[in-house]
Amino acid sequence: MNEESKKKINEKYERTLLKGERFWPDSIFKDVIMSFGIFLLLILLATFLGVHDSPKADPSDTSYVPRPEWYFLFLFKFLALYGQIPVLGKIEFIATIIIPGIAMGLLVLLPFLDKTPYRYYTKRIFPISIMSLLVVSMVTLTLMADIPTTAGEGIYIPGITQVIAGLIVPSAAFIILTLMNFVFKTTSTKVMIWTTVVSAVLMITFTGATLALAPVTEKTEAAVASTLEERIVAGQDLYSVHCVECHGEDGKVTTIEGVEGLEGKAVMAINGKDVLYTLNDATMAEVIAYGRPDAGMNPFGKAYNPEGLAKGEIDYIVTFMRYMWDDRFERPVIKPLFPALAAGEVPSYDVHIAPIVKRYCVSCHRPGKDSNAYLMDTYENITTSGDNAPSIKAGDANSPLLQVIQGTPIPDPDNPGQNLVGVMPPKSTLKADVIDAWMRWVMAGMPRTAEEAAALSTTPTP
Amino acid sequence: MQSTLWQKIYAWLDERLGLDNMYTGLLDRPEPLGNWWNTLGSASLFLFLLQGATGIFLTVYYTPSPDHAYDSIQYIMNDVAFGWLVRGIHHWGASFMVMVVFIHMLRVFITGSYKYPRELTWLIGVGLLLMTLGMGFTGYLLPWHQMAYWATTVATQIAGSVPFLGEFILKALRGGPDLSALTLQRFFAAHIWMLPAALAALIGAHLYLIIKHGESAYPDKED
């Protein structure tokens, strides 16, 4: 830029200043309102949306699908789509380094590449077009970020529309605009604007199509227990499923009974001071994760056990053990397993039976355990599965399940003197209120949801 | 004329600090007519200060070690008085800062304000954008939860795909071949010391240049 145009720019700026405003108080007034508005918005977001929590980091859980902060999602998606290109897609660093590097380089060098003194929009159609399309790409790629790029075999239409919206249209538009600007220098402003608008509309349309066609993906983020009480209950539930078989409900078992492969093994009572006073939390978590091969303790960490526990889950179990059994810790008030039933109230699967089953039954009655194929992990399985199905019949007080939980084994008709099903649970008895909940539930017809149960409830006549 | 005590104090301070000069030099400056788009730069500065203030409070309880990082944040969220608010503001403030800085950059681009005499202001601004993204990237790992851990694993792998230098960059970022306590420690150091120091220095330069050249005017058909 020559001295003359510099002088012109500076003189023009001096003239604009004369009809301008003052920094204090005119500009600062707007600045303060803007900042204060943002501050209020942040407080509202922090109060009403809070921070989305994820479980504790677990280096052994390699199945976790990573997801960056939202403002990096567009890059993430770009990489995924780029990987779909044949041949070129295999050269990863083009997409990870070269293309972002060129983009950053252009941004840094912008004032030195564009040395014309023109500032008005119509005189700068090319850079503004390119930047607009970049912004549209970033937005559309971010919107498509959660949709899987491929779906195994066969034709996957959302995959094709994604590549069109995220790669083909923008690249074509960038090339066409560049050619118009540098090769056919006479291209009119109108043609360039139309090219930009049409490309942007195409990108948005194909993104919309992708979002409309893509299968809804379920989000399976594990629940995060945050308060101490939630952590203890989460630990108790996990303990009930994974540990009760050997260690017993209260952890005082010293000789394992009735567990295949570990029958008669002597173990330490894990509810006693020998364990709780001598091991700190980290060591306890390690014993659960890595096991104690010599002492019969199986490893439960995800790295060693296909159906194992995540790091955070193991921490919940340790918290549960501490607060339930260690007399140095004060046990907080914990909500009962299910809300107490009033006279005439009918329990539901969701509110009452599911937590009971999780606490007392699922430890053995789940896939991979020897339990006469009676699985109790879902409503359907509880009502229909098993070698001796059905174990419960709606309205039948003599259902086999109700008999065995009340201490009456079912005799085997083929082998007199033998039991087909023993009493359940095998080594303890259920509390009266739990049996009562089961009885009421079966007699009322086994309602699944709280609403169904409420419809069946009766108010006792006074 | 009898001057009050406050006037005496002001006169004494003004003699030594040059308050009147500061007023004319910094506050009572002429500016071209602006609109709400012109508030985004100062909004970025406000967010930087807010992130600094909330971040300093968070370091009181936060522990940068794999064993305690997650639990210390649970503690901040559940047990510290207003800890949830401070962390909530810091969390959302980060997203806002990236967005506001980006939109600010777009505004400068669209109005062509990066041209003579403000080329250096733009250059420093691009540096500020990169630093802000760096803050987002390093801060994301600190809660040490699953999302953070695996996102950082992948992001550092991507940095490792640079030809020839990749291996070195990967190890420098992670402090070893894998994500470990060292990674968390150096991300923490970058997040609370290195990047904020660099950001503050660049912001100072950016502000100096803005005051020196004045805010740019919106272009008209002659420009």
Image (spheres, coloured by chain):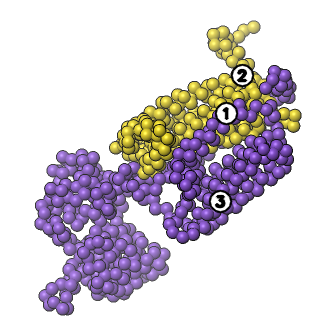
A65 or B65, nearer to the observer:
A65
Q: What chain is tagged by disc 3?
A: A
Q: Please, which residue is most extreme toward the top here? A: B1
Amino acid under disc 2: Lys
Q: Which residue is mark 3?
A: A164
Splitting the image into 4 quarters, where does residue A127 fall? Answer: top right
Residue A227, relative to residue A38: is it above or below? Answer: below
Q: What chain is tagged by disc 2?
A: B
Same chain for the residues at labels 3 and 2, yes or no? Answer: no
Q: Is residue A295 visible?
A: yes
- SS label for mark 1: helix
* Chain identifier, colour purple: A
**Residue at left offset 37%, top offset 86%:** A394
- Chain B representation colour: yellow
Residue B126, relative to residue A425: is it above or below? Answer: above
Where does the image place residue B97, in percent across and percent down from the top left?
Answer: 60, 40
Q: Residues within 10 Å of mark 2 (few under 14, many from 20)?
A: few
- SS label for mark 2: helix
Where does the image place residue B74, in percent across and percent down from the top left?
Answer: 41, 47
Splitting the image into 4 quarters, where does residue A121 fall? Answer: top right
**Residue at left offset 69%, top offset 18%:** B22
B40 or B131, nearer to the observer:
B131
Q: Which residue is mark 2?
A: B212
Q: Which residue is mark 1?
A: A109
Image quadrant where one finds the N terminus of chain B: top right
